[in-house]
Image: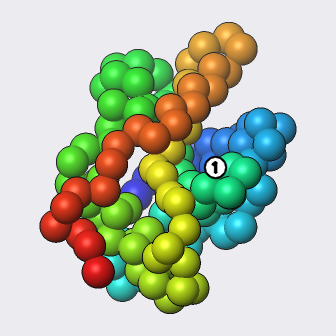
Amino acid sequence: MPKVALNLGVLSEDKAEGFLKASGYKILRRNYRTKLGEVDIIAKDKDVFCFVEVKGRSNDKYGQGFEAVSLRKQAQISKVALNFLKENRLLDKSARFDVVSFDCSAPEQKITLIKNAFELGERFTY
């Protein structure tokens, strides 16, 4: 991955973390990695565990950041989320998938939060 993209990713995650905290989320983990993949941020919004994908864009050439969370990426995040819940004995708790999109090209650096952006497919049950 080019250094510019890596820096944008870190900047976007930093901004997203601050935004989520200001929105009342409690950040539990950042860059949670397993052999199955990675979740950018794991947080709690009240009693709900949130698995947050962060997408930053330096321009809109390829669309908005949230548009880049493909079905394949959703499946990967779902597997990692289930691993986290199982590992921490939290399978009986409420959880959802959120996406934070960070647009660096906008003068005010627009942040968009999409709560419950996608659902866990039936094939990913334990």
Residue 7 position, x and y percent, is 60, 50
Q: Residue at x 41, y 80 (%)?
A: 83
Q: Quadrant of the N terminus?
A: bottom left
Establish if 112 lies above or below 51. above
Q: Nearer the viewer, residue 9 or 121?
A: 121
Residue 44 coordinates in the image, percent (x, y): 68, 57
Where's the C terminus, which quadrant? bottom left
Q: Which residue type carries mark 1?
A: Glu
| Picture layout, residue 103 above or below residue 8 | above
- Residue 106 drawn at (x, y percent): 60, 14
Between 59 and 120, which is closer to the camera in this rendering?
Answer: 120
Residue positioned 69% across, 50% down in the render: 45
**Which residue corresponds to the image point at 47% horizontal and 76% vertical from the top-left?**
91
Give the quadrant of residue 40: bottom right
Q: Badge 1: how crowded within 10 Å, few (<14), some, or many (20+)? A: many
Toward the front, the furthest residue is 92
Residue 31 placement, left or right of 18: left
> Colour scheme used in the picture?
rainbow
Image quadrant where residue 19 sits: top right
Reading the image, the residue beneath label 1 is 13
Along the line of sight, the residue nearer the viewer: 124 or 32? 124
**Left or right of residue 85: residue 41:** right
Residue at 21 percent across and 48 percent down: it is: 71
Of all residues, the one furthest to the left in this rendering is: 123
Tell me where residue 41 appears, x and y as whole percent: 60, 59
Residue 100 in sight: yes
Give above or below for 108 relative to 34.
above
Q: Is residue 54 left or right of residue 73?
A: right
